[in-house]
Amino acid sequence: MNRNVYLRIIVSSIFATLILVAVSILCLSRFSDFSARAHRTKFLLFLAESVERRTANLSTDYLVTPEGRMKLEQDLHFSPPHFAFGGPPPPRPQGPPSHFGPRSNFWLATESGEVIFQSMKDSKITPLSSLEKPKNVHEISRHEDFFRLFPGIYVLKLDKNPSLYLVAKDDHRPVLGPLFLAQAALTLVTVL
């Protein structure tokens, strides 16, 4: 055979391998997101219920005022639920905690998009005006990229009148980086 034929076979096999690696990583990413979706939805509903319970006797008009915002700062520092394998919750430190549990980033916004509470003060806020808002109470609007490579943003309408929205940002992706690299290496070795 001619040397150019061997070169074409090698180049086309490397190209096919890269395509298979990309498809396998995409499938793995979609599968992991699909398996975490139910847990994420339940956590957002838990968070919404906790916020609604702690602001049940407060109107949205009051929450927009400086006094209402201070009340939110005091009332909305709580820990997420601990499950049977996690053991009992750790003792609470003195003073308000600096954030809402591990890696949880959420904020409350009014219908006009004004942010009245933010769980992590140093995080960047995505304006509510650029996101699709759910129409029904406790409905979740998801904003994710197709490949799930960037943090997802979730908007949930709370049971308040006038409307109040809980916006959560999934800043932390699970430990998928090493898993993706391992999957890519296995696919590459299998094909070659």
Image (cartoon, grey):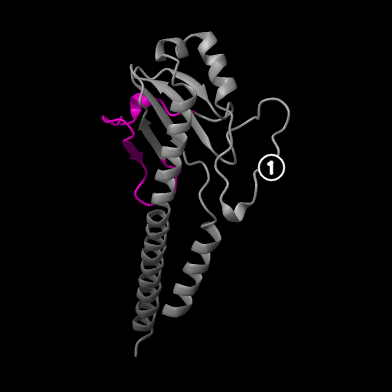
Can residue 183 be found in the magenta stretch?
no
Q: Is residue 74 left or right of residue 60?
A: right
Q: Residue type at mark 1?
A: Pro
Q: Where does residue 68 sit, x and y in percent of width and height? A: 51, 12
**Main secondary structure along the magenta-highlighted residues:** loop
Front residue of 109/74: it is 74
Residue 66, above or below 125: above
Q: Is residue 105 visible?
A: yes
Quadrant placement of the N terminus: bottom left
Residue positioned 52% across, 25% down in the render = 118
- The local secondary structure at tag 1 comes to loop
Q: Is residue 6 left or right of residue 87?
A: left
Q: Identify the residue at the far right of this view.
A: 94
Quadrant placement of the C terminus: bottom left
Q: Where does residue 52 sit, x and y in percent of width and height? A: 43, 26
Residue positioned 44% across, 73% down in the render = 187
Front residue of 168/52: it is 52
Query: Which quarter of the figure has residue 122?
Result: top right
Residue 152, above or below 191: above
Numbered range of the magenta stretch:
125-152
Residue 82, above or below 110: below
Q: Is residue 192 visible?
A: no
Residue positioned 55% across, 29% down in the render = 119
Residue positioned 34% across, 37% down in the render = 140
Judging by the rendered image, the residue that carries numbered circle 1 is 90
Can residue 136 be found in the magenta stretch?
yes
